Amino acid sequence: MVGPRVRALRDAMGLSLRDLAERSGVSAPMLSQVERGETSPTLAVAGKIAAGLELTLSQLLRLDEGQHVAISRAAGRRRSERGGHRFEELTPPLPGQRADVSLHVLEPGATTGGREDPPMHEPGSRETAVVLAGTLALVVDGSRHELQEGDSVTFDADLPHHFENEGQEATRFLAVIAAGLRRS
């Protein structure tokens, strides 16, 4: 049934029934009936709901998912390196995915980006970082925050930000980016 999926996606995006109704062009009472399983939407209505949730119809109906488990093998992960900053994407690219997990290594003196680089994340995104080894500084919207091994931090990732390693050893940290989930 599509109803529980619509409800879960709407909740994850922090949308009320009225919000989704405005975004999709489907009335709030119809959305409520779909979510409760009292009616099944036509393909046209399902397409509008999907668009309101920023998904394709296939993503909403999970037509493009062959299975419910996706393993990201170490040898096949997407990797990148720039100026003493290495990272790899731990989550495979899946349709409709709203969160990404990545592992970062910053060499001494390295940063994750330039001080003036624009944010790389969509409006409403949140990021959580966990320091696995070493020390790390987060500079977000002009404010500096010092982190030690074992510390974690969560912040609005749509603000200008970067990480710095001013220590003498390489720093390892995990970053989890949840897209568009910030609630006011």
Image (cartoon, helix red, strand yellow):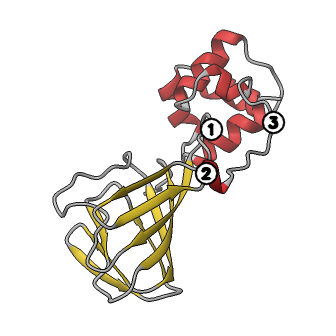
Disc 1 versus disc 3: distance between alpha carbons? 11 Å
Mark sitting on residue 94: 1
Vertical placement of residue 71 versus 107, above or below: above
Q: Residue at 35% x, 75% y: name it.
A: 107
Vertical placement of residue 179 versus 4, above or below: below
Residue at numbered disc 3: 67
Mark sitting on residue 91: 2
Q: Residue furthest left?
A: 116
Q: Nearer the viewer, residue 54 or 82?
A: 82
Quarter residue 49 falls in: top right
> Earlier along the polypeptide chain: callout 3 or callout 2?
3
Helix, strand or loop at mark 1: loop
Judged left or right of residue 45, residue 148 is: left
Q: Position of residue 132 (x, y in %)?
A: 53, 80
Amino acid residing under circle 3: Gln
Quarter of the image with the C terminus is bottom left
Helix, strand or loop at mark 3: loop
Amino acid residing under circle 2: Thr
